[in-house]
Image: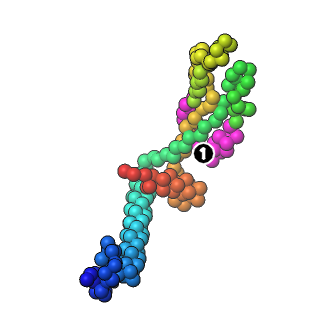
Amino acid sequence: MAHCARCGKKQSIFSSRASGYCGECEGVVKAEVAEQKEKQAKEERLRHEEDVRQKLERLKTGVRQQLEKGGRAYLYETRFIPVDSIEDSVPLSNAFAITHLQAMGLSGWEIVGVVPRTSARTLQNKDLGSGLFTYAGGIGGTVDGVYILLKKEIPADWEKNEQSRREVGQLLAAQAVMPV
Ligand SMILES: [Zn+2]
């Protein structure tokens, strides 16, 4: 007769448990395994958080040292702005709106690059006899918007300035979680 592998209690001859545990112990063991898995996952998460924290500190130290020895450091950002190009007499957007850029300019951001985004589409003809569509050609190269690349110099006293500290902090935090 089989005995439970955990408590040694005799098992019913009708028992066909693959685990080798009695009903009671099977429940206990399952709970222990689940708890163990959860504990490992938590440790893994904490280890990862600690790695990210250390990497963030290294990045901050890097910027700090760079500026302390008189070097320069910059922030970069990008914004997409729709362009009111005309297609079949219809503008693609209402206006070329730069209100947001103007606000960024006031807080020290400078435009250093513009990349036009173009769109393309195929044109179709409907055959009146068969009702089928045939491709008639296409149009491309319509500028439907621009990506604006902006730059802002990180001031030497960025750690004392709340806005700079937040801007640099956010950028470094994003870098710290990026896989190497
Ligand atoms: Zn048992």
Residue under the point 26% across and 81% down = 2
- Mark 1, residue position: 108
Query: How packed is label 1: few (under 14 Cα within 10 Å), some, or many (20 or more)?
Result: few
Residue 150: x %, y % from top left: 56, 40
Residue under the point 54% across and 57% down = 165
Residue 154: x %, y % from top left: 51, 49
Residue 153: x %, y % from top left: 52, 46
Position above or below: 98 against 74? above
Residue under the point 39% across and 83% down = 24
Which residue is farthest top?
129
Q: Which residues are magenta?
A: 98-116
Residue 91: x %, y % from top left: 72, 26
Position above or below: 178 against 127? below
Magenta region includes residue 93: no
Position above or below: 99 against 94? below
Quadrant containing the N terminus is bottom left
From this viewpoint, is residue 50 visible? no
Mark 1 falls on what kind of element? loop
Tell me if 84 is positioned left or right of 165 in this view: right
Position above or below: 102 against 31? above
Magenta region includes residue 112: yes
Foreground of the two, 98 or 48: 48
